[in-house]
Image (spheres, coloured by chain):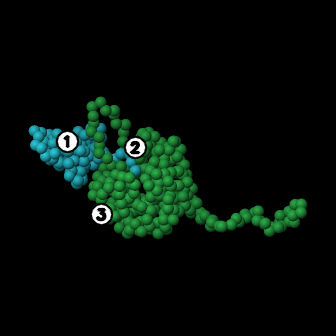
Chain colours: A green, B cyan
Amino acid sequence: MTLSIAGVELGSRLVMGTGGAPSLMALEGALVASGTELTTVAMRRVARPRPGAPADDGSVWGLLARLGIRALPNTAGCFSVREAVLTARLAREACGTDWVKLEVIADDVTLLPDPVGLLEAADELVRDGFVVLPYTNDDPVLARRLEDVGCAAVMPLGAPIGSGLGILNPRNIEAIAAAARVPVILDAGIGTASDAAQAMELGCDGVLLATAVTRAADPVRMARAMRLAVEAGYDARGAGRIPRREQALASSPPDGRMAVGDRPGNLDLAL
Amino acid sequence: MSTPTPSPTAVVNGEPYALAAGTTVDRLVAELLPGCVVDGAPQGVAVAIDDAVVPRSLWPTTTVEPGARVEVVTAVQGG
């Protein structure tokens, strides 16, 4: 059940985000319960120490190192190619990884990816030696273009960031997964476990989610649910679902039924 | 921003920062983040000056010039 990205084998197909958790302790419980081996972090300015400020309770960076979880820095909050590229380069320096979840966001209302900037930044970062995992629209053509410039995976959204609306365009997600030669990771929009299972059933190779877990009433329990859902969806996809039918189809044999009252036996009723 | 002041300043993470003569990047980071220095090397931190990353290996020999725009960033929860 490993997921291979850029030659690295990950033991879980669930990629977790760390945004939205109320505390590092709550985050730790959720990360462990999720079984994730790859987890996003954001890059932000360090806070200057203030006299009388409470002591730092440790960093998410230290937490991931302690749990043995690979960090996937993101370029969240970047609205231009220039910002995203600089943020990726800072992340490479700070986190010691050339993997980056590339986000170039169009505006702070929709939080949708800017397709033009995304492709340009992806191209630049791939040329600079990065392993680029772009957060992209649910557009099969854009996914193909991102793959063409050398992205190591494509990560289409199910629904807008933080919306929890699930997969709004399953046909597009399925088309992206069917055509891709790199892993497809559904990113954003997951609200509950069935959404994660659906992503896998549609052919995605993995699921990335954060707030569906971190803002759930019981994050640890939801993290476990997501782990099981991703595994269930993966197995269901691999098992091959039955075709959908317009009519009912009996599963018990029609032959050999007994006669009761006026009804003769073995009537060809599908029951 | 360019008003001359008695002591030279840089802009560090958007705030004015008084520079002692010859302040290097590694000294600046150690002052900002005394807690993150492990074995003499700050962990999980990166620095850009005027939109260009300063590789860690160059921190001890890179001087922060007056007027420089310095960003010191680290990994936080997100995404």
Kind of element beneath mark 1: strand
Q: Front-most of A53 and A15? A: A53
Residue of label 3: A124
Q: Residues within 10 Å of mark 2 (few under 14, many from 20)?
A: some
- Name the amino acid, label 1: Pro
- Name the amino acid, label 3: Glu
Residue at the image point whose x is 35% and y is 55% from the top: A107
Q: Residues within 10 Å of mark 3 (few under 14, many from 20)?
A: some
Residue at the image point whose x is 39% and y is 57% from the top: A112
In space, the residues marked 3 and 2 are separated at their CA atoms by 31 Å
Subunit that carries the residue with mark 2: A
Q: Which mark is residue A63?
A: 2
Residue at the image point whose x is 38% and y is 52% from the top: A109
Q: Which mark is residue B53?
A: none
Q: Tell me if A175 is positioned left or right of A61 in this view.
A: right
Check the image and report above or below for A21 versus A103: above
Quarter of the rendering occupied by the C terminus of chain A? bottom right
Kind of element beneath mark 3: helix
- Name the amino acid, label 2: Leu
In space, the residues marked 1 and 2 are separated at their CA atoms by 31 Å
Position of residue A65 measured from the top left corner of the image (x, y, whole percent):
39, 46
Subunit that carries the residue with mark 3: A
In space, the residues marked 3 and 1 are separated at their CA atoms by 32 Å
Mark 1 and mark 3 in contact (Cβ < 8 Å)?
no
Which numbered disc, 1 or 2, marks the residue closer to the eye? 1
Residue of label 1: B16
Q: Front-most of B57 and B48? A: B48
Position of residue A116 measured from the top left corner of the image (x, y, whole percent):
34, 64
Residue at the image point whose x is 61% and y is 64% from the top: A241
Kind of element beneath mark 2: helix
